[in-house]
Amino acid sequence: MTAEQNPRQSSDEKHTYASQGTIGIDGESGDSSNSFWSKEEEAALLRKVDWLILPILVFGFSTLTLNRSNIAFSLNNGFLQDVGITQNDFNVGQQLLSAGIVIFENHAQIPSNMILYRVGPATWIGFQIIAWSLVGTFQALQTGLGAFIATRLLLGICESGFIPAGLYLMTNWYKTFETGKRFSIYFAGSMAAAALGGLIAFGVIGNLHGHGGLSGWRWLFIIEGLMSFCSGVLFILFIPRSPTDPVSIFGWRYFDERESQILRQRIILDDPTKGVRVGSNVTWGELRRVLTNWRLLPHVITTIAAICPAQGLGTYSPSLVAGMGFSNLSAIAMMTVPPWVLLIGNLSCGFISDKLKSRGPVVLVALICNLAFMIANRSMIHSQDGIARFCLLAVGNFFSTSWLLISMPFTGVDPVHGSWLSMNCISEAERSVTMAIHIMGANVAGIVGAQIFRSDDSPPFYPRGWTVILSLVATAVAATLVSNLQYLILNRTGRRPEGSKWKL
C-alpha cells in the first residue's frame, strides 16, 4: 500500500514501498530481512491465507445451501405422507424458517457479532454450523406437525447468522480492496451447491430409498446434515483466531513469526474499521428521516414483490416439474439447470449495469422480461408439452430472482437493485438503515411467498398461484418504473443536497 492510498496516517507510520520494492514493517529503514516485506512476499502470504480460509468458508456456505433447499426435493419422495402433514402445514413450516432468519439475522446480529468478537470466529461460526447440522440431521426422524414446525423454526434460527459472520471474518483477514473477489467466491459457492443439490438428491433418493427401512428423503437429510457437521468441525479445528493471533484454538500455527507480523501490520495499516461496522450508532432523527423518505417506498415494494415468488417457486420447483409429465427422479435431476441459468443472469446484469453505468433501467428491463416469461408460464399450465414448459421456467429464471431457494437474502437482478438503492442514499447513516430495510424486505418476502402454492389450488397446475406470481411481478415492474421516473424528475427539478445527480 502506498502513502497515497492511506493519506490519513502520518509519514512515520506508513509502510512505504522502498526503491528495492519492499514494505517496512515498523516504518523505519533497515535490513529487508528484519524490517521490510516485499510485494512478492505479501502476495505469497495472501495466497496462503486464501487456501486456509476460503475453502472451509465456501464449504460451510455450500452445506447451508444444501440444508435449506433439500426439503424441496423431499416433496418428490413422499415427505408429506411420511411425516403426516398437509401441504398447507408444510407452507407454515417454510414461513417459520423464514421468520427465524428474519428475527435473528436482522435483529440479533449485534449480540451475535459481539460473541463472535469475544470467542473468535472459529469457535462461534463452527458452533453455528454444528447447531444447524444437528437440526438438519435429526429432521430425518421427524413425524407429526409439531416436530416439523419445531425443526423448521430451529433451522432458520441456527442458520441465520452464518452469512454476515462469514463476511465479517473475511473483512478481518483481507484489505478492503481485496474483499470483492473473495465475496464473489463466497457466494458462488452457494450457487454451485444449489446446482449440485439436485444431483446429490437424485443419487441419494434414487439409490438409498428403502435402505435400512428409511425413505430416500430421510437419507438425504442425514447425509447433508453430516456434511454440515464435518464443515463445523473443520472450522473449529483449522480456522485461526484472527490475523493478530493467527493460531487455531488447539495451538496449531500456520504462519512463522515474520508472516504473523506482516499479517498484523498489513491489516492495521489498511484500517479494518473500513470493513463491516457492527453496531454503528444511528440516531432516532436519522432513523425517522429514512422511514419517512418517500423515495424508499417504491424500492421496498419492488424488493418484496420481486422476491416473493422465489420462495414458492424455490420450494415447489421439483414438484412443478414433475407435474409437467416427468418422473419424480427426473424432475429432481433437472433442477440442476436453473442455478446455472441464474448465475449467468447475475453476471450479465452486473456486467451490463457496470458497462452502462446505470442500474434502474437494467432492473426494469429484466423485470419486464421476467413478467413476459411468467405470462407464458401461466398460459401454458395445462399444456402437455412438458419440455417447453420447463424451458420457459428455466429461461425465465435468467431475468428473475432465484428459482431455487438458495441461501442469499436476495439474488437475480436484486443485487443490481440493491446497488442502485445504496447509490442514492445521501449519508452513511441513511445507507445503513436503508440497506437493513432492503434486506429485511427480502426476508419478509420469503414469509409471504411460502403460501403462494396451496393444496386447494388444483395441484400440480396451481392457476391461482401463477396468477398471484403474475400480479407480484407486475407490481414489481410498476414500482421499478416509478423509481426510475422519480429520479428523472428529481434531476430536472433539483439535485441531491451535495449537488450531484440522482443515480439511474
Image (cartoon, rainbow, N blue to C red):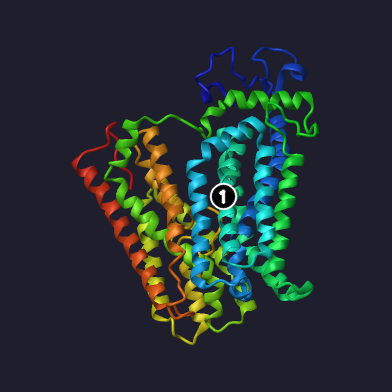
- The residue that mark 1 highlights is 157
Q: Residue drawn 38% across and 50% down?
A: 359
The one nearer the camera, 94 or 346, is: 94
Estimate the x, y position of residue 365 in percent, counting from the top left. 36, 61
Q: Considering the numbered disc 1 on the image, is that residue within a helix, a strand or a loop? A: helix
The one nearer the camera, 273 or 114, is: 114
Estimate the x, y position of residue 246 in percent, counting from the top left. 73, 30
The quadrant of the rendering that contains the N terminus is top right
When asked about the image quadrant of residue 170, the answer is: top right
Q: Residue drawn 27% across and 32% down?
A: 497
Estimate the x, y position of residue 71 in percent, counting from the top left. 60, 65
Q: Note whether 484 is above or below 36 in the view shown.
A: below
Q: Is residue 443 left or right of residue 187?
A: left
Residue 174 appears anywhere in the view: no
Three-letter code for the amino acid on which mark 1 is drawn = Ile
The one nearer the camera, 373 or 445, is: 445
Q: Note whether 318 is above or below 417 in the view shown.
A: below
Which residue occupies the extreme bottom position in the image?
384
Q: Residue drawn 62% across and 27% down?
A: 267
CA neighbours of label 1 inside 10 A, class few (<14), some (14 to 19), many (20+): many
Residue 496 appears anywhere in the view: yes
